[in-house]
């Protein structure tokens, strides 16, 4: 229990550094995480309001497809292709990396790193 609390504290502190707090915990043996954001964030084609979302890999065969759903599984906000990316050594406790945004815009989620996994998923944005 103490380890879980420590992990959540580190994740929150990392994301607070970019003004968005996130906490994550793994659910089951696969790559599924619940991520909570205290501010709006963006994915390709969608802006997510503050709240908790499920990030998961919906396919056992294609590990480059990521799906983002509401906490209760009732709504799909994003489903698309991603590029594999390795987690930087300095960000071992971070569940997401965020990009820069113009004032008043939600910062884009650049990559999602499933808890406990070295490899992550970089989202593909149109230029």
Image: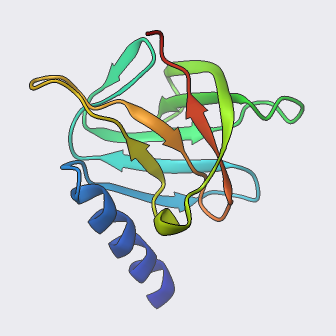
| Left/right of residue 24 with respect to residue 66 in the rendered view | left
Q: Nearer the viewer, residue 46 or 86?
A: 86
Instruction: State the residue in front, 85 or 70.
Output: 85
Report x, y in % for residue 67. Answer: 60, 28
Count the numbered circles shown: 0
Question: Does any portion of residue 1 appear in the rendered image?
Answer: no
Residue 102 position (above or below residue 50): above
Residue 126 screen position, x and y as percent:
47, 10
Q: Which corner quadrant of the image does residue 8 belong to?
A: bottom left
Query: Could you tell whether 92 is left or right of 81 in the image?
Result: left
Q: Quadrant of the C terminus?
A: top left
* Quadrant of the image occupied by residue 9: bottom left
View extreme (left): residue: 103
Residue drawn 27% across the image and 34% down it: 100
Quarter holding residue 105: top left
- In the figure, is residue 86 to the left or right of 15? right
- Compared with 26, 72 (above or below) is above
Q: From this viewpoint, is residue 22 visible?
A: yes
Q: Residue at coordinates 23% horizontally, 28% vertically from top-left?
A: 101
User: Which residue is rendered at x = 53% and y = 43% of the image?
Assistant: 112
Q: Position of residue 61 (x, y in %)?
A: 90, 31
Judging from the image, the colouring scheme is: rainbow
Q: Position of residue 28 (x, y in %)?
A: 71, 58
Q: Is residue 19 above or below residue 41?
A: below
């Amino acid at each position: 229990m103490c380890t879980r609390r420590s992990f959540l504290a580190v994740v929150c502190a990392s994301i607070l550094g970019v003004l968005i707090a996130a906490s994550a915990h793994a659910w089951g043996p696969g790559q599924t995480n619940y991520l909570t954001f205290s501010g709006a964030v963006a994915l390709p084609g969608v802006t997510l309001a503050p709240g908790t979302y499920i990030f998961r890999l919906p396919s056992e065969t294609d590990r480059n497809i990521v799906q983002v759903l509401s906490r209760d599984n009732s709504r799909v906000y994003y489903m698309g292709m991603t590029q594999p990316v390795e987690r930087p050594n300095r960000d071992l406790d971070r569940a997401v990396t965020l990009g820069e945004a113009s004032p008043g815009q939600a910062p884009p989620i650049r990559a999602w790193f499933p808890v406990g996994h070295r490899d992550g998923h970089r989202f593909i944005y149109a230029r």
